[in-house]
Image (cartoon, rainbow, N blue to C red):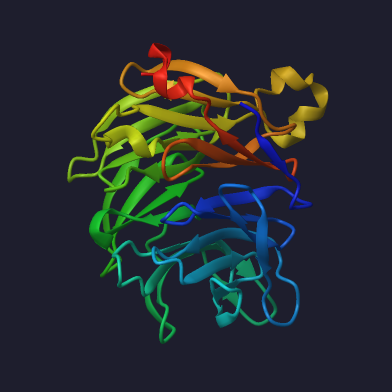
Amino acid sequence: MKPYLLHIHDRPLTMVKFSYDGDFFLTCAKDGDTCLMRSDNCERVGTYHPVGDKAGAVFAVDITMDSKYVVTATADGKLIFYTLEGEQVHSLNHGGILKYVEFNQKPGEQNMVVTCNDKFKSSAELVPNRIMVWQFQPPKKLLSIDNDLPMKATKVKWGPFDETLVSIFEEGYIIIWDAAKGAKIHQIDAHKGPVTGISFTEDRMLMLSCSKDQSAKLWTMDEEYELVKAFETDRPLNDAAISPLYNAEKDPKYHILMGGGQDAKDVTTTAGSSGKFEAILWNMVFGEEIGSVKGHFGPMNTLAWRRDGKGFVTGGEDGYVRVHHWDKDYFTSKKFE
């Protein structure tokens, strides 16, 4: 399996994201660029630029299910909405250092985004750590959680049916909030180190969290929020995702993909192979590693499965995007069941 190596960014990648149909994927990085790529041949369709100055680092990007609108969250505190074609629709002055943004999950009614930001002190005002929900059209603030927020959230996503917000923290907690009132519903003491990422199955009923404490954990998203399984790896994890084929009618693949590696600042003191920058594939039922895919020359920051489960895309600290397609034996060989 030969990956496509895309050198489309000059700085570390922060996120890769597939469109709902899987024909495009978006990448964003700390160089301020957000690129729209074709999934099949990896050609760049275009980049998203805000009107006026170049964006600061872009920490997150999302696209609606009908692929009409794209939203980016930038380090200079702006929430920018574009059409897919690249026209800017709105630019909201959000304040703080925006770390994450995600459209709500209701098909046909994706008119809200959830965001989180780090506190930022400027001469004019002090913006606290907060989690916010904004309406997209017309733009207005619907919810702000700041006083109840114990520390800064690094990412926040919508829970099942847009009823809850799920936020992760560097202190190892995952906190669930009521999406309408902003009340705290549940706190999971999930990891011993910073939680670096969460991802969900398609119906958002299972959540996979990963952490710098070298483990990934699978949780149910009903009222119990109970731990289903823990996966202990040998490297700090930055991202993990559940295969979209896990509930396929025919030949389901109970696989999770994880990636990370030694922190960027420690890399110079070790040899390339020992940094553990590969993508690793685990079986989520048996909790065993199936294999690994050679990868970046630095920690892997973000990964995403293709929507059909036939491959994946990773983005690294080295500024490269690697696009992998599984070989035929991934679907035929007994090893990968």
* Residue 133 point in image, percent of width and height: 39, 71
* Residue 140 seen in the current view: yes
Q: In the rendered image of this protein, does residue 337 appear above or below residue 316?
A: above
* Identity of the residue drawn at 45% across and 39% down: 172
* Residue 226 point in image, percent of width and height: 24, 34
Residue 252 versus residue 170: which sits nearer the camera?
252
Tell me which corner region of the image, top left, top right, bottom left or bottom right, holds residue 201. Answer: top left
* Identity of the residue drawn at 37% across and 18% down: 287
Q: Is residue 304 left or right of residue 298?
A: left
Image quarter (top left, top right, bottom left or bottom right) of the C terminus: top left
Q: In the rendered image of this protein, does residue 307 appear above or below residue 57?
A: above
Q: Going by the picture, which residue comes out furthest to the right?
A: 268
Callout count: 0
* Residue 163 point in image, percent of width and height: 24, 61
Residue 40 versus residue 20: which sits nearer the camera?
40
Residue 281 versus residue 43: which sits nearer the camera?
43
* Identity of the residue drawn at 60% across and 40% down: 314
Q: Going by the picture, which residue comes out furthest to the top?
A: 334
Q: In the rendered image of this protein, does residue 330 appear above or below residue 202?
A: above
* Residue 284 point in image, percent of width and height: 35, 24
Tell me which corner region of the image, top left, top right, bottom left or bottom right, holds residue 92. Answer: bottom right
